[in-house]
Image: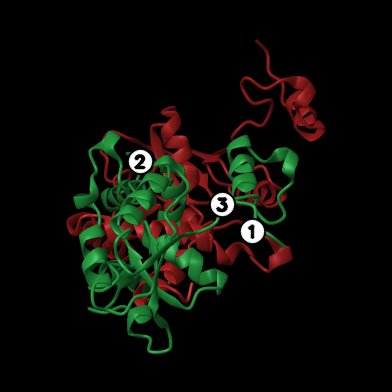
Chain colours: A red, B green
Amino acid sequence: MSHYPLSIMNLVKNISRLPGIGEKTAERLTMHIIRSPIKEVEQLSLSILETRKKIRSCSICFGLSDSDICNTCSDGTRDNSLVCVVEQPADMVAIEKSGIFKGTYHILQGVMSPMNGIGPDDIRLKELLSRIKGNNIKEVILATSTTIEGEATASYIAQCLENSPVKATRIASGIPIGGDLKYIDQVTIKRAMETRYDI
Amino acid sequence: MSHYPLSIMNLVKNISRLPGIGEKTAERLTMHIIRSPIKEVEQLSLSILETRKKIRSCSICFGLSDSDICNTCSDGTRDNSLVCVVEQPADMVAIEKSGIFKGTYHILQGVMSPMNGIGPDDIRLKELLSRIKGNNIKEVILATSTTIEGEATASYIAQCLENSPVKATRIASGIPIGGDLKYIDQVTIKRAMETRYDI
């Protein structure tokens, strides 16, 4: 490493700080960057800084947004009476990719985890509950992960909504489509049996 | 992808242009960047642009440099009578890492390849020959790759030096250290036998 000019060593160091990028890869990327047209490099450099500065939480759903209200929340064609609750922006993107859901989202920006000292006040739960009041919301779909923390968070939110007119539902767990039963873990099979439905 | 805000989509696109980085990795890196402290992101962004702008070819050896003359060429402790000829800056770094060589370098910035229309005038060969004249150089070590092109380039340079007082040598080919003979290819074994030396 010390055999490179100083600016290259710095760039390699900065790039290798990114997750999953080792020193070898950082070196390869650096070599690519110094050989690339200046226009492309300017674009990359600017895009990194601009995106970091621009991106904020949507003040309705707490998802990623370029502006105060995100594209999904400001999209007039979506069903505002449905709110899908997820842990992270990436979860929302995964559901959007499926194309099945045309309601709105609420991003908790985390998950309750007593073991790590993360309680109901450390996630965007208060904001969800106040959003539900008086916004004509009919159903809250709890789509937190099926981890212990995700399940506990979903249960907690369902309890909070028990005495409200809003219906709380949980996204189904079970055998993934294309899944081979003999390779599916026992907990998943147990849940799939318990939550079986009439066909 | 279209489920992200525009600036995120742009950043993912720009990052996934880098070699060996797919869209999934670019998405992961983008998410990391928008969650990183602004100071770190500024440093990365600046370092990319600055390095690209700063790095040039050393006007003596044509290696990577921050300034007109690179660190190696301006290092007074190195033996200027020895010139090691390599194809690319990364080859020079590989030799430097071995710590065995204390002479200077000449980076050809390519290799002769008649198949691809790359002749002696398309690499930094003229510059090598003019550097050799009157600079009190005693030995040129040809350390181009042991590919067909690298071998041909080394032979060509050796021919150019035939009638000069400068000695041309070729870096040795043979069994890599720690190499198991039964896994070494035949061409390498043939070369190792041909160039065997007395012990």
Which residue occupies the foreground of this view, B13 or B124?
Answer: B124
Q: Quadrant of residue A170?
A: top right
Q: Quadrant of residue A102?
A: top left
Q: Amino acid at mark 2?
A: His
Q: Residues within 10 Å of mark 3 (few under 14, many from 20)?
A: some
Chain at tag 3:
B
Q: From where the camera sits, is residue A57 visible?
A: no
Picture residue at 28% right of the left edge, 56% below the top: B160
Q: Residues within 10 Å of mark 2 (few under 14, many from 20)?
A: some
Q: Which residue is mark 2?
A: B3
Q: Which residue is mark 1?
A: A112
Q: Nearer the viewer, mark 3 or mark 1?
A: 3
Q: Nearer the viewer, mark 3 or mark 2?
A: 3
Disc on the earlier residue, 3 or 2? 2
Q: Amino acid at mark 3?
A: Ser
> Residue B84, image x and y in percent?
41, 67
Q: Which residue is mark 3?
A: B173
Q: Are marks 3 and 1 on the same chain?
A: no
Q: Is residue B138 left or right of residue B121?
A: right
Which residue occupies the foreground of this view, B81 or A163?
Answer: B81
Which residue occupies the foreground of this view, B71 or A183?
Answer: B71
